[in-house]
Image (cartoon, rainbow, N blue to C red):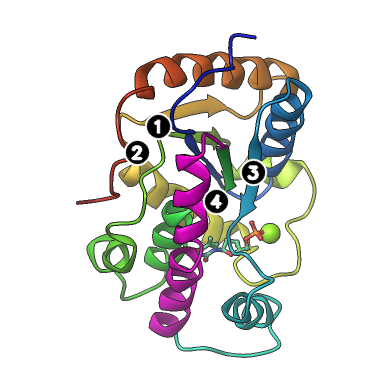
Amino acid sequence: NALTRRGRGLLVAFEGCDRSGKSTQCQMLVDYLKSTGRDVAHLCFPDRTTSIGKSINSYLQGTTELEDHAIHLLFSANRWEAVPKIKELIEKGTLVIMDRYAFSGVAFTAAKKGFDVKWCKNPDRGLPSPDVVFYLDISIKDAEMRGQFGEERYEKAEFQQRVADIYKQLRSDDWKVLDAMRDKNDIHMEIRSTLLEMEELCRDAPLKNLWT
Ligand code: TMP
Ligand code: MG
């Protein structure tokens, strides 16, 4: 089929506020790609299974407290520890689909008092850069109407609004902003066709490094 090709795999990230449908779209895309026989890997950040990830998990659940700079660096370290695997997968032609990435790292910390975007970007500078970022765009009002935010740290409307404002500052040409209020199948079809275009564009280009 059209998605079958030789050469490196694509690095794809999904970003957005809570309740934007990010994880749903991520899963729909992974399922679709698998159904076409593509080699696909589904990664989630934070990856709560590693020892760093376990510290992050207990911080998010409120079991432990961590200083704001320290937790920022742990989130970043949790991505860096995945880099050898990501590079290996991309090299062997696997499509790597990530639910959240460094943009979450920057948006959620920079939303805190006393942090600026420039400082927040630094630890993630040089990570493999996604070929495309799908941003699920939703107003915090609409997100709230989909049901209460959860119980984890950060899942409060006021904080999410600040996160959304920072995400806006991070957008670049590699981003595909999608209206998260559209029918989820329509969104999925748009993601599919964007991915096809990206595969053509990135076929011979090496992975770039983020924010360098
Ligand atoms: P999740 O709900 O997608 O598992 O993400 C957990 C929370 O962690 C979510 O509120 C976003 C936040 N987060 C950060 O603060 N920094 C990061 O680097 C990442 C990946 C997520
Ligand atoms: Mg969550």
Q: Is residue 72 magenta?
A: yes
Query: Which quadrant would residue 193 be assigned to in this image?
Result: top right
The answer to whether the residue bearing label 1 lies less than 8 angstroms from the nearest atom of ligand 1 is: no
Packing grade of label 2 (10 A; few <14, some 14-19, many >=20) is some
Label 3 vs label 4: CA separation? 14 Å
Checking the image for residue 175, the label placed there is 1
Residue type at mark 1 is Trp
| Residue topped by disc 4 | 100
Q: Are marks 1 and 3 in contact (CB under 8 Å)?
A: no
Dot placed on the residue nearer the N-terminal end, 4 or 1: 4
Element type where label 2 sits in the image: loop
Q: Are marks 2 and 1 in contact (CB under 8 Å)?
A: yes
Residue type at mark 3 is Ala
The answer to whether the residue bearing label 3 lies less than 8 angstroms from the nearest atom of ligand 1 is: no
Residue type at mark 4 is Arg
User: Which contiguous range is marked in magenta?
Assistant: 68-94
Element type where label 3 sits in the image: strand
Residue in view at x 31 percent, y 69 percent: 123
| Residue topped by disc 3 | 41
- Provide residue 199's location: percent of width, then percent of height: 45, 20
| Residue topped by disc 2 | 171
Label 2 vs label 4: CA separation? 14 Å
Asked if 196 appears above or below 56 in the picture, the reply is above
Asked if 164 appears above or below 118 in the picture, the reply is above
151 sits to left or right of 200? right
Q: Nearer the viewer, residue 185 or 165?
A: 185
The answer to whether the residue bearing label 4 lies less than 8 angstroms from the nearest atom of ligand 1 is: yes
In terms of image quarters, where does ligand 1 lie?
bottom right
